[in-house]
Image: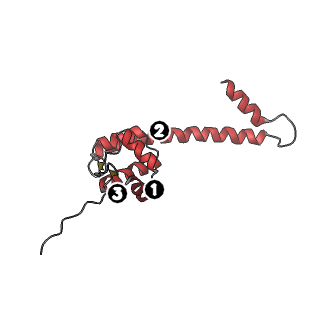
Amino acid sequence: MARQSQRIRRVTRGELARLTGVNAETIRYFERIGMLPKPDRSEGGHRLYDDEHERVLIFIRRARRLGFTPEEVRAILGLGGPGRAACAQVRDIAQHHLGQVRAKIADLLEVEKLLAATIARCSGDADPQCAVVDMIQEGAAS
C-alpha cells in the first residue's frame, strides 16, 4: 500500500491569529523580536505559517500567561523550545521565575495589610480627613 505524503499546512497571519487566539499584530511583534521564526512567503509575497509556528506561538502565549517575561520565553525557545530544550536548563529559568513570583506575592501581601489597616481607620463619613488619602499622600513622599 502506497503511503501518502504528508502535506504541510500553510496559513495566513490572520488564520494563525484565529487558530491561536493571539492578535495578528502580536504575531508580527513576536516575529520582529525573533521569538517566532520568519515564515515562508507565497509567490505573491504573503506570509505563510505552518504547524511549527502555531506550536511555538501557543507556547509563547501560555508562557506569558504564566508571567514568564519575554526574555525568559526567548531563553527557553533559544534552548530549543517545546519538546527540545533540556529540562535542567528550563528548570533553572522556571526556578528564577518562581522566585520573582514569590517576591511579588510578598509585596502584594504587604500592600494588602497596609490597605486593610488604613481602611479600618477610615471613618467613611463626609469628613474631609481621610486615612486613605493621608496614607497615599504620606507614601508619595517616600
Give the side of residue 35 with respect to residue 134, left or right: left
Which of the two labelled residues, at mark 2 and mark 3, occupies the earlier sequence position?
Answer: 3
Res. 94 visible in picture: no
Q: Amino acid at mark 2?
A: Gln
In depth, the one of 106 and 41 nearer the eye is: 41
* Number of dots carrying numbers: 3
Between the C-alphas of marks 2 and 3, the distance is: 37 Å
Question: In which quadrant will I find the C terminus?
Answer: top right
Assign a secondary structure to mark 1: loop
Give the side of residue 126 with respect to residue 47, left or right: right
Mark 1 surroundings within 10 Å by alpha-carbon count, few (fewer than 14), some (14 through 19), many (20 or more): few
Q: Which x, y percent locates residue 137? A: 73, 29
In depth, the one of 31 and 42 nearer the eye is: 42
Q: Residue at x 24, y 63 (%)?
A: 7
Q: Amino acid at mark 3?
A: Val
Q: Which x, y percent locates residue 37? A: 31, 45
Quarter of the view holding residue 71 = top left
| Residue beneath disc 2 | 100
Q: Which x, y percent locates residue 123? A: 83, 41
Q: Which mark is residue 21?
A: 1
Extreme-bottom residue of the structure: 1
Q: Which x, y percent locates residue 69? A: 43, 40
Which of the two labelled residues, at mark 1 and mark 3, occupies the earlier sequence position?
Answer: 3
| Residue beneath disc 3 | 11
